[in-house]
Image (tube, rainbow, N blue to C red):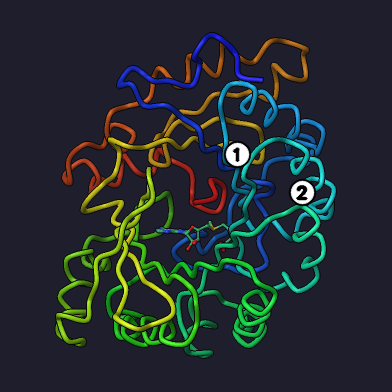
């Protein structure tokens, strides 16, 4: 039921209808750009939302106008009660989807179907098993690649997300696009973003402009077709003529899409982040456990959202390590 007061609209008129929920801080991979080498300080188990709490908080957002929920992590599928969570959330009137590394997704095909989940985003940064191992510090390339084929065969809409890192996987951009020749998937290249402990450096980032320069040098220019982006889309979408799939660039750094941002994030320990880049968070779990009304807290958090990238509105601010180290590492936000 949509409430009268509009608690999900911010001071810039942006309506927040898309909630990303991180189910866990744990992951079965150790991607170097996502998790600091020394690991992270995990929240005590008692501080992590249980499935009833996830449902309660999600329902409050849905009652106030959220229409889309994406589950993320850590790795959402490593959470033992993920099937219970999926089934509970599937009772809400929302478009439910998941972002995963796909290492163990073959175990959940029936649950995903039963919950009417159609859209699956899979993170894959290299098509080379050795490089996959280097970036994830795990040897699971074959498993992931097979599971991507399985998801496609089972009829899911698959998007592959690859974070581009200069000198590491930028030489695979064309190979990734070539995958879309025979596979009906969307490959999305993500600009490498700065977070606490990920040793970000602008030089390591491959920008939207650089990707397109390479695309135009590698394909006949008349075959590169700009396709319509979905409303509130964070990606610029393209396809190669007659290819089954498409590709896109998510340019959070060089070309932020803050004006049309409709996203909010809930961390596994029940904190609301009004922006991926924001250092501040609002605790919803403690007041929920105390039986308090969380709506006023949500409203205040939404109203304090900055216009651009958590207040890092210039490239200089984004490059300032002091500013991005005030934010969490991505492993505990969820992307
Ligand atoms: N484990 C799941 C997965 O692998 O998709 C969900 C969590 S993961 C943190 C979500 C997404 O964030 C992944 O696509 C990952 O590549 C992306 N990501 C993590 N750190 C990033 C960074 N520094 N810059 C850009 N994207 C990042």
The percent position of residue 34, horizontal first and vertical second, equals: 48, 60
Disc 1: which residue: 267
Q: Earlier in the sequence, mark 1 or mark 2?
A: 2
Q: Nearer the viewer, residue 315 or 274?
A: 274
Q: Is residue 114 left or right of residue 156?
A: right
Query: For the residue labelled by badge 1, is the local secondary structure a helix, a strand or a loop?
Result: loop
Residue 33 placed where, x, y %? 44, 64
Q: Which residue is mark 2?
A: 86
Decide: is 263 above or below 35.
Answer: above
Q: Which quadrant of the view contains residue 213?
A: bottom left
Q: Mark 1 and mark 2: span between their CA atoms?
A: 16 Å
Between residues 107 and 286, which one lies in front from this camera angle? 107
Q: Which mark is residue 139?
A: none
Quarter placement of the N terminus: top right
Q: Nearer the viewer, residue 153 or 37?
A: 153
Residue at the image point whose x is 31% and y is 57% from the top: 228
Q: Position of residue 151 (x, y in %)?
A: 66, 74
Name the residue at 50% across, 15% down.
Answer: 7
**Number of numbered callouts drawn:** 2
Q: Is residue 330 left or right of residue 12?
A: right
Local crowd size for mark 1, using a 10 Å CA cut-off: few (<14), some (14–19), many (≥20): many
Q: Secondary structure at mark 2?
A: helix
Rendering quarter of residue 166 = bottom left
Within 10 angstroms of label 2, few (less than 14), some, or many (20 or more) residues? many
Residue at (25, 45) in percent of width and height: 318
Q: Residue at x 62, y 76 (%)?
A: 152
Q: Residue 219: image x %, image y %?
A: 21, 86
Q: Report if the CB atoms under discs 1 and 2 are less than 8 Å apart.
A: no
């Amino acid at each position: 039921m949509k409430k009268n007061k509009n608690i999900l609209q911010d001071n810039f008129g942006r309506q927040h209808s898309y909630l990303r929920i991180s189910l866990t801080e744990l992951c079965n991979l150790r991607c170097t750009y996502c998790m600091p080498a020394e690991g992270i300080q995990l929240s005590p188990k008692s501080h992590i939302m249980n499935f009833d709490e996830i449902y309660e908080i999600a329902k409050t957002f849905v009652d106030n106008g959220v229409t889309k929920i994406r589950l993320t992590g850590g790795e959402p599928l490593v959470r033992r009660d993920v099937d219970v969570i999926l089934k509970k959330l599937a009772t809400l009137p929302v478009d439910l989807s998941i972002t995963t590394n796909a290492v163990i997704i073959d175990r959940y095909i029936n649950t995903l179907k039963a919950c009417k989940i159609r859209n699956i985003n899979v993170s894959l940064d290299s098509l080379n098993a050795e490089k996959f191992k280097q970036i994830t510090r795990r040897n699971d390339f074959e498993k992931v690649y097979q599971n991507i084929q399985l998801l496609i065969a089972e009829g899911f809409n698959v998007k592959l997300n690859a974070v581009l890192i200069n000198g590491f996987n930028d030489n695979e951009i064309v190979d990734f696009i070539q995958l879309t020749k025979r596979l009906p998937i969307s490959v999305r290249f993500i600009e490498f973003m700065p977070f606490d402990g990920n040793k970000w450096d602008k030089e390591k980032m491959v920008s939207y402009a650089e990707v397109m320069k390479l695309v135009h040098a590698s394909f006949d220019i008349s075959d590169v077709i700009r396709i319509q982006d979905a409303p509130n889309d964070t990606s610029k979408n393209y396809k190669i003529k007659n290819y089954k799939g498409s590709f896109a660039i998510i340019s959070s750094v060089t070309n932020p899409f803050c004006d049309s941002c409709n996203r909010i994030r809930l961390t596994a320990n029940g904190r609301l982040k009004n922006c991926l880049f924001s250092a501040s968070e609002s605790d919803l779990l403690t007041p929920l456990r105390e039986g308090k009304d969380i709506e006023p807290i949500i409203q205040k958090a939404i109203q304090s959202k900055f216009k651009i990238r958590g207040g890092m509105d210039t490239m200089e601010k984004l490059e300032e390590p002091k500013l991005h180290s005030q934010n969490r590492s991505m492993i505990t936000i969820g992307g």
